[in-house]
Amino acid sequence: MSKKQPTKERSLIIIKPDGVQRSLIGEIIGRFERAGLKLVALKMVLATREEAIAHYNKDEAWLLKVGESTIKNLEEKPTKTALEYGQGVFEGLLKYLTCSPIVIGVFEGNQAVGIVKKLIGGTEPLLSDVGTIRGDFTLDSYSIANGNFRAVRNLAHCSDKVEEAEREIKLWFKDNEILNYIHIAEGILYDVNLDGFLE
């Protein structure tokens, strides 16, 4: 990973099927814009299974961890191995991401990955803080999702780390689909001398 100016950091967001179907696209994008992040790429797609697999990029260790967690939270005696439960959860994620159009965007700005993550909130909506996208707009929980063997419907995805953002952005966007431009808000956010505002 190359060392970049922090104001040029980029994060990928995906407005998931429930966010699209509940007409929250503008609200979600607006949260990032109001924080001062610059939108540099945006598109709506119907993701394929292959794209979803590449996006989630989960290995057997993740499947086992999720499967063990599922077994721990089951009310009845397990009927499958941890790996089988983990694969079931993964299949639920794939089904969820591919069931409806999704909106994918790239936001740029100072520490964009951390800012986007903070605005979206924790993975489980029930535990997300008020004021976050997940905390304000959905009430799904792991207990309901796991009980029905489906993905938790938490409206949006964001990159967890800078390296992850770089990998995910390359999956969904070609270089020529990401725009480099100056946004007027960058003057007030990043201009060292704060000149050029007065006539």
Image (cartoon, rainbow, N blue to C red):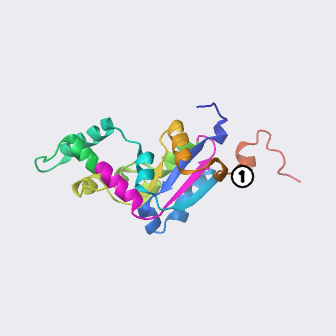
Does the image show residue 172? yes
Work out which residue is located at the far left of the displayed protein and give it.
77
Work out which residue is located at the far right of the displayed protein and give it.
199
Q: How many marks?
A: 1
Q: Locate residue 94, reporting x and y percent.
A: 36, 54
Give the residue displayed 25% in from the left and 55% down from the top: 149
Q: Quadrant of residue 192?
A: top right
The quadrant of the rendering that contains the C terminus is: bottom right
The quadrant of the rendering that contains the N terminus is: top right
Work out which residue is located at the far front of the displayed protein and give it.
50
Give the residue displayed 85% in from the left and 52% down from the top: 198
Per the image, is 4 magenta?
no
Does the image show residue 153? no
SS label for mark 1: helix
Part of the protein shown in magenta = 89-111
Q: Locate residue 190, reporting x and y percent.
A: 72, 42
Query: Neighbour class for label 1 at 10 Å: few (<14), some, many (≥20)?
Result: few
Q: Identify which residue, 194 or 177, lies in the foreground.
A: 177
Give the residue displayed 25% in from the left and 53% down from the top: 146
Per the image, is 101 magenta?
yes
Q: Is 84 placed left or right of 60 in the picture? A: left
Q: Identify which residue, 96 or 171, lies in the foreground.
A: 171
Q: Locate residue 112, reporting x and y percent.
A: 58, 44
Residue that mark 1 sits on: 185
- The three-letter amino acid code for the residue at tag 1 is Ala
Q: Is 147 placed left or right of 104 in the picture? A: left
Q: Is 5 placed left or right of 67 in the picture? A: right
Q: Locate residue 173, reporting x and y percent.
A: 58, 50
